[in-house]
Amino acid sequence: MPERTKRRLTAVLVADLVGFSHLVEVDEEGTLRNLRTLRNEVIDPSIDVFGGRVANTAGDSLLLEFPSVVDAVRCWSSMLNDIANRNQELAQDQRILFRAGINIGGCRC
């Protein structure tokens, strides 16, 4: 009899920085510095707090996995609030904004 693969429910959050090419065109060093600071001080700590993990990154995008959709939504909400507060200190053309989607489904792990 074939071995059964365990299945589990997971929530996947995909986020992309809005207008990344334009931000880099205007101020490459500043944009990359701001993004790195957000990752270190806001994004990565929030992912840890809500039990998520970074599954993949590609420049200005993130692929995150969470044990539940509730954790994913709470994490994203927390990050958005922190990012909005930090953006208030920046000029309009330097603000970092993200768009995201969350999907829930099963995986064979």
Image (cartoon, grey):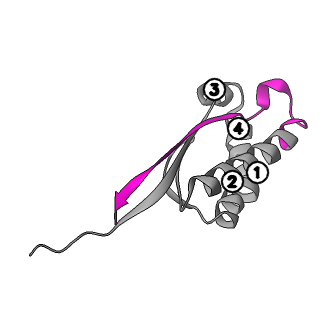
Type of amino acid at the residue the image marks with label 3: Gly
Give the secondary structure at mark 3.
loop
Label 4 belongs to which residue? 31
In the figure, residue 32 lies in which quadrant? top right
Disc ID at residue 78: 1
Residue 42: percent from left, percent from top: 75, 54
Type of amino acid at the residue the image marks with label 2: Cys
Task: Give the residue drawn at x 66%, y 63%.
Answer: 50
Residue 75: percent from left, percent from top: 68, 54
Label 2 belongs to which residue? 75
In the drawing, does residue 8 fall left or right of residue 101? left
- Which residue, as the protein is rendered here, is positioned at the far front? 1
| Mark 4 or mark 1, earlier in chain | 4
Type of amino acid at the residue the image marks with label 1: Ser
Residue 79 painted magenta: no
| Mark 1 or mark 3, earlier in chain | 3
Rendered position, 3 above or below 76: below
In the drawing, does residue 68 fall left or right of residue 34? left
Which callout, 4 or 1, points to the residue nearer the camera? 1
| Mark 3 or mark 4, earlier in chain | 3
Disc ID at residue 19: 3
Along the line of sight, the residue nearer the viewer: 27 or 98:
98
Q: Which residues are magenta?
A: 86-109
Assess whether mark 2 and mark 1 are in contact (beta carbons under 8 angstroms).
Answer: yes
Which callout, 3 or 2, points to the residue nearer the camera? 2
Assess whether mark 1 and mark 4 are in contact (beta carbons under 8 angstroms).
Answer: no
User: Gap in Å between the C-alphas at discs 1 and 2?
Assistant: 5 Å
Which callout, 3 or 4, points to the residue nearer the camera? 3
User: Gap in Å between the C-alphas at discs 1 and 3?
Assistant: 22 Å
